[in-house]
Image (cartoon, coloured by chain):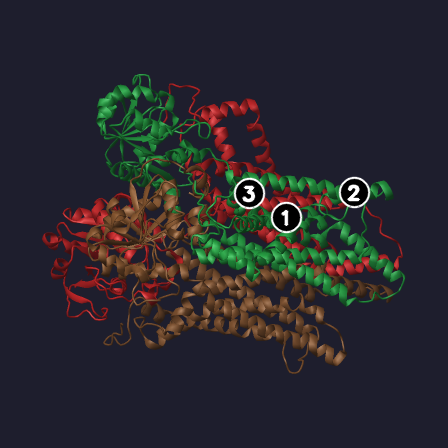
Chain colours: A brown, B red, C green
C-alpha cells in the first residue's frame, strides 16, 4: 500500500494497546525498533546487561534485566550480535517456549557454517526461533522512508510463532514474506549483503567489451589519421567513437543472451538426455541471461540517442555546410541514387524495429509484468520475439556495413572496421539456431526435452 | 525474492528432513518435481504401476506400487493424465483423508465439462483435492530459471489441505496464490494454455489498420508518381510510408480506447438505467481497452523514432543539399515566413506533449504501478489525462494537415491524404465526449451511474 | 492473476453454492456487491427497512427485514452510511458473535475522530467488525474492469473473522491485503479519498518553476528583441523557450531531490545526534524525494525530445540554408574549429549519459523493481548513481554555457541567460555534498548515524 506506508510516520502515532513485546539489546537497531513499535501501539520492555546505564531509550519504554524483561512478554526480539548469543544459555529456563526473533545480520556472506538463527535454535532448543527484520535498516524503520523495500522475509520451524511475528510485521506497516522453514535463514541473512550478484558477470563483461572496442576505434579513427594525415580527430572520442562502441556492445551482449541456450541444446543432443546437469558455468550463464539482455538494452538505448543527436553536432553541420557550398560553387546538381536511398532507409528502419522489439523484451522482464504472463506467453516473448530482435539488429549492422562497403573504407593497419568483428558472434548464434530448428534436428531435441533418453539404461542424476 | 529464487538451484542442495511426500507417476514432470523436492530436503516416494521398470528416478527417491507409496505420506502429487484417473478408485481406501494435489493440465482450453481437479474430487469424495503446480513447467522446476513466473495458483475446498500445499510451494522457493475454492480449478487449468487472450483483438485490429493504410499510401505515393511522372519512389516504403501508417494506427487505436466508454454512456442515457448489461461485444471491447492503448503507444513510439531519424536519411540530405545549391546559384535569400515557423513548431510541440502524456498513461498501466494507485487516482489518470492525450494528438494531426494544405497537395485518383481519414474517428469521439460533458447531459448520466432509474418499475438483471 | 480476473465477469457465472451472505442496505453498492456474489455462487439475503419497497434487487436474491436477514447468515455486509449505524443497536441481540463487514467510505479525509469501523465496533462490542471492500467501486465490481486495483485492504481485531472475509474476497477474484488490527481502518478509509498526496508538493513546485522561467525567457528572447530590433520572435514560444524551461526545471528538481539529504546531514552534525526528529517540513520533503525525482525525469524526457526535433524545424532549416547560401555566394570555405567540435560533442555526450542514468533511476523506483532489490542495492542506486546523474547534468549545463559564452550573449536588461540561474542550486548541493564526504566530516557523521551522541546525557525522543 504505497501511500499508506509512506505516510505512516505522520499518521500512526496511535497509543492503542497491542500487547507487550520484549527487546534484548539497547543498540541502535533495538532502539529504532522499539520506537517504531511504541508508535504502533505496543508497549515495549528492553532487556539490558545493566539497565541503569542504558540511556537514549525511547520515551515510554521500560528497561529491565534480561531475565526480568523476558518474563514480561512471550515474544523477544534479539538485537544483539551472534558473538554474544551464548549468554542466553543462562536464561534457558525463562526462554523456554518463548518466541525468539533473530534480527541479526553478518558482515560478509556465509560468514559462519550455519545461519545465526539456526545457531540460536541449537543453543535454545526449547524456544521457537523466527528469523525476521534483518532486511530492514534502522534508518528505514525510523524515517519511514521505506521505498527500498517494505518486504520482511520471515522464516521459522514453528508455524504459530511465525504467524505471530508476521502479524507484528503487518502492524508495523511492512509486508511479511513467508520463506518457509528455518533452513531459509542463511539465505535471508545473506540477502541484505548482496550487491547485484547476478549483475556482476554482465557488468564486467560489458566493461571489457567497451574498453577493448574503444581503444580499437581510437587506433583506427584517431591515431591512424594523425600518423598519416596529421589530422586531429580527438574530438571523435566524445560521440563518434562511443556511437561505434555501444552498438557493438549491445549486439554482442544480445547474442550472448541466446548463445547459452544454443550450447545447452547442442549439449543435450550430444548427450542424448536432458537428465544431466549442465556444467556450472553454463548454469550460471543461463541464470543471468536476463541481466545480460538488460545491459544490452542499455547500450542500444545509448546508441539510439547518440545516433539521433548526429544532425545537431557542430562537426556534422560544418561538413554538410561545406559539401553544399562546394557543390554550389561547382554549380552542379547532385544526382539522386535510389540504391543509396534504399540502403540508408532500410538499415535505419531495421534498426528502429529491432530497438522497438528490444524495448518490448525489456518491459516484459519487469517483475510485475513477467508475473502477469504465464509460462507459455513468457517463452513466446523471450524466445520468438528475442530471436526476431537479434535478426533485425544483425541485419541492421549487415546493411550498415553494406552501405559502408560502397564508400571506400579500406583496412587500416590491417584492422577491419569494428562492426565487422561485432558481427561474428550474432551470425554464429543465428546459424546454429537455424540448424537446431531444422525439422530433423528439432524432432530429436523435442523428444529429449520431453524426457526421452537415447540410452535409457544410464541415469545420471545427482 | 528475485535473487534468492534465481540462485536456488545452486544453494538449496540441503539434505535436511522436511517430511515425506508421495508422487504418483514417474513421467518427466513427476521426476522434475521429485528432484526439486529432494533438493529442498523432502524425502520422496514415487508410486508407479510397475516399480521395477521405472528408471531415471532421482537418486535418493524410493519407488513403490501405488498403494504402498500412498501409505508412506499424507500428501500425494498426481502427475498423471486425467484419462488414467479412474484407476485411483481402486485405491479409495488408502486415499481417504489424504491430500491429493492435482498438477494436471489439458491440451486445449475448456477441454472437459468440469476441471480435472473437480473430476478427481468426484472420483474420490473422501480425499482432499488441491489444485496446484500446473502453471510451472518441468524445465522451470529443474533449471530454476523461473523468471517467467514464480506464482503457483492453489485452490481447494479444504483450507487445511490448501495451507499444507502452500507451505510446500514456499519451501520450493515459489509464491503460492490462494485462488479460493476448487471452483477456480477450471480457470487455473486454462491459464497456462492462454496466449495473450486480451491482446488478440487489438493485435488483429492494428494489423488490419496497418496493412490497409500501407497499401493506401503505396498507391498514392509510389504507384501514382510512377504512372504519371515515371518516378521510382519505391524507397519510400522503408521509412516515409511506415511513418505515415504508424501515427495513423496510433491515433485511431487511441480513439478506439475511448469510443466504447462514450458508447456505453450513450447506451445508459438511452436506456435510462445502468442496471442492464452491455452487449457482449461492448463488454469485451471495454475489457481490452488497456491493451488497445498499449498497442497504440507502441505505434506512437515507432512514429517518434521514424520522425527523429528524418534528418540523417540520405534522401533528406540530398534534397536539402540541392535546395540550398539552387538557392545559392540563383543568389537569392530565402525569405522567412513566421506563419510556417509557427505551424511547424506548434504541431511538433503538440506531438511531443501528446507522446509524453501517452507514455505516462503507459507507465501507470504497469501492474505494479496501477496497484499502487487507488481507484480515484486511476480514474483521474486514465480518463482526464487520457482525453488530454487524445486532444493533443488530434490537434497535432490537424495542424500537420493545416501545414500540408498550404503546400499544394491535391487528391490523387480522388484519394485524400491518409491522415485526413485518420482524423475521422478521433474527432467523432471528441465531439461525442464534449456533448456528454455538457452540464445538462452530464447531470442525468451521473444520476444514472449513482443507481437512479428513469422507469424505476422495471429491473433488468440477469 | 491479470488475465483470469479480467475475464471473470464472462466466465464466473457459476451457480455453485458458496453459502449464504447477508447484505444490509439496498443501495447501489449493496446491489452491485450482491450481484457479484450471486455470480460467484453465494446465495444472498438483503436486509432492508421496508423489504416490500425495495426494487431493482438482483434476480435470485432474497430481501427481508434487517433482523430476519441477519439470522440467515453469520456474515453481514453493511452497505449503509455511518450516520445510520445507530439503528443497529436495536439488533444487538441478533448481531452478537456475527461478522460485520464495514464497507463504508467518508466524503473527506479524517471526517470523524475515529474510523467508521472502530465506531461500529464500539456500538456493537459483541460483533466481530472487519473493514473491507471500501477501496473497490460499485462500477468496478459490476464491470469487472478492475485494472485500477484488485487489492482489497482488510483489517480487524478478530483473526478468524478476518480470514473468513479474506476468503470471500478471493472467491470474488480480488486480492485481500491484511492490514492488521482495526486500528488501520482509519487509514484504509482515507486511502480511496487521496489524490496523489505525495505528488502535490512536487507538482506545484514544478508548476511555479516552469511559469517563472517561461516568462523570464519570454522577456529575454521575445520582448527584448521586439523592443530593440522590432523582430517578431513569438514563434520561439512553441519550442525554443520550452526547451530552455524544461531542462532548467529538470536540473533544479533533481538538485532538490538531494538537497534535503544534505540538510539532514548538516542538522545531525550540528545537533551531534540522530535521535532528534527532523522538522516536519524536512520530513515531508524527504518523503516526497521520489516524486520530485520522477517529475524531474519527466522534464528531462521532454527536454530530450524537444532537442532531438531541432533539425526538422522549419526555422532551423531556413537558417542553415541561408547560412550555407551566403557562404557559397561569398565563395569561402568555413574553417573547422576543433575546440567548438569538442565543446558541442562533449556537452551533448554528457547530457546523453546523464539522461541515461536518470532513466535508470526512474526504472529502479518502480514499485516492482524496488521491491526486488535489497536495502544496500537501493542505497547504491539512489545515492551513488543519483549523484553521478546530478554531476553529469550539471556538467552538461556548464559546458553548454561555456559554449554559449564563446558566442556573444550579453545581459539583456541586466538579465543573465536562464541556465545561469538554473546552475545555482545544483552547484550548491554538489559543493555541500563534497564537503560532507571529506574524511574528517564523514567520520563523525557515520558515527552519529550508528547511534553515537555528542552529549550522551540528553535524549530527545517523542
Query: Which element is circle 3 on?
Result: helix
Q: Earlier in the sequence, mark 1 or mark 2?
A: 2
Question: Do marks 3 and 1 share a chain?
Answer: no
Residue A200 versus residue A50: which sits nearer the camera? A50
Left or right of A184, for residue B292: right
Helix, strand or loop at label 1? It is helix
Q: Chain of mark 2?
A: C
The numbered dot on residue A445 is: none
Q: Are marks 2 and 3 on the same chain?
A: no
Q: How far across and down, in percent of the image, does residue C226 sit?
A: 83, 41
Q: Nearer the viewer, mark 2 or mark 3?
A: 2
Q: Quadrant of the C terminus of chain C?
A: top left
Q: Are marks 2 and 3 in contact (CB under 8 Å)?
A: no
Q: Position of residue C352 (x, y in %)?
A: 63, 59
Q: Is residue B369 visible?
A: yes
Kindly report the distance in space between the C-alpha atoms of the residues bearing marks 3 and 1. 34 Å
Q: Position of residue B125 (x, y in %)?
A: 15, 46
Instruction: Give the residue displayed 21% in from the left and 71% down from the top.
Output: B55
> Can you tell which of label 3 and label 1 is closer to the viewer?
1
Q: Which residue is mark 2?
A: C222
Residue B217 shows up from this direction: no
- The CA span between labels 1 and 2 is 24 Å
From the image, tell me which residue sits under label 3: B254
Circle 2 packing at 10 Å, graded few (<14), some (14-19), many (20+), is: many
Secondary structure category for the residue under label 2: helix
Q: Residue B5: name its quadrant.
A: bottom left
Image coordinates of residue A149 in percent, x first then y, are 42, 51
Which residue lies under the disc numbered 1? C252
Amino acid at each position: 500500500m504505497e501511500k499508506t506506508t509512506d505516510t505512516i510516520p505522520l499518521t500512526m502515532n496511535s497509543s492503542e494497546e497491542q500487547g507487550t513485546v520484549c527487546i534484548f539489546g539497547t543498540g541502535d537497531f533495538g532502539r529504532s525498533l522499539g520506537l517504531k513499535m511504541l508508535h504502533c501501539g505496543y508497549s515495549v520492555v528492553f532487556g539490558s546487561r545493566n539497565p541503569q546505564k542504558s540511556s537514549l531509550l525511547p520515551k515510554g519504554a521500560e528497561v529491565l534485566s534480561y531475565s526480568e524483561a523476558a518474563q514480561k512478554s512471550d515474544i523477544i526480539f534479539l538485537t544483539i550480535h551472534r558473538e554474544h548469543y551464548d549468554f542466553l544459555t543462562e536464561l534457558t529456563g525463562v526462554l523456554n517456549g518463548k518466541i525468539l526473533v533473530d534480527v541479526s545480520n553478518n558482515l560478509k556472506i556465509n560468514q559462519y557454517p550455519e545461519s545465526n538463527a539456526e545457531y540460536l535454535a541449537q543453543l535454545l532448543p526449547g524456544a521457537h526461533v523466527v528469523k525476521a527484520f534483518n532486511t530492514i535498516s534502522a534508518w528505514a524503520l525510523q524515517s519511514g522512508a521505506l521505498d527500498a523495500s517494505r518486504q520482511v522475509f520471515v522464516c521459522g520451524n514453528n508455524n504459530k510463532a511465525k504467524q505471530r511475528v508476521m502479524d507484528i510485521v503487518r502492524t508495523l506497516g511492512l509486508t511479511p514474506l513467508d520463506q518457509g522453514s528455518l533452513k531459509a535463514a542463511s539465505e535471508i541473512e545473506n540477502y541484505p549483503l548482496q550487491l547485484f550478484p547476478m549483475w556482476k558477470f554482465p557488468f564486467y563483461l560489458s566493461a571489457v567489451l567497451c574498453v577493448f572496442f574503444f581503444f580499437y576505434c581510437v587506433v583506427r579513427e584517431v591515431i591512424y589519421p594523425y600518423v598519416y594525415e596529421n589530422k586531429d580527430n580527438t574530438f571523435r572520442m566524445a560521440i563518434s567513437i562511443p556511437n561505434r562502441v555501444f552498438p557493438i556492445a549491445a549486439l554482442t551482449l544480445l547474442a550472448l543472451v541466446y548463445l547459452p541456450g544454443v550450447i545447452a541444446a547442442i549439449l543435450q543432443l550430444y548427450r542424448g538426455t536432458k537428465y544431466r546437469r549442465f556444467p556450472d558455468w553454463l548454469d550460471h550463464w543461463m541464470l543471468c541471461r536476463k541481466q545480460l539482455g538488460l545491459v544490452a538494452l542499455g547500450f542500444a538505448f545509448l546508441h539510439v540517442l547518440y545516433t539521433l543527436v548526429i544532425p545537431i553536432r557542430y562537426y556534422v553541420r560544418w561538413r554538410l555546410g561545406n559539401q553544399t557550398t562546394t557543390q554550389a560553387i561547382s554549380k552542379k546538381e547532385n544526382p539522386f541514387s535510389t540504391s543509396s536511398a534504399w540502403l540508408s532507409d532500410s538499415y535505419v528502419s531495421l534498426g528502429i524495429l529491432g530497438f522497438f522489439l528490444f524495448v518490448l523484451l525489456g518491459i516484459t522482464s519487469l517483475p510485475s509484468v513477467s508475473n502477469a504472463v504465464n509460462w507459455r506467453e513468457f517463452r513466446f516473448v523471450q524466445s520468438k520475439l528475442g530471436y526476431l530482435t537479434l535478426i533485425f539488429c544483425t541485419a541492421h549492422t549487415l546493411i550498415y556495413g553494406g552501405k559502408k562497403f560502397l564508400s571506400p573504407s579500406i583496412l587500416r593497419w590491417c584492422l577491419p572496421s569494428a562492426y565487422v568483428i561485432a558481427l561474428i558472434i550474432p551470425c554464429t548464434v543465428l546459424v546454429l539456431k537455424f540448424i537446431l530448428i531444422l525439422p530433423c534436428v528439432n524432432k530429436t531435441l523435442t523428444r529429449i526435452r520431453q524426457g526421452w533418453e537415447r540410452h535409457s539404461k544410464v541415469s545420471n542424476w545427482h
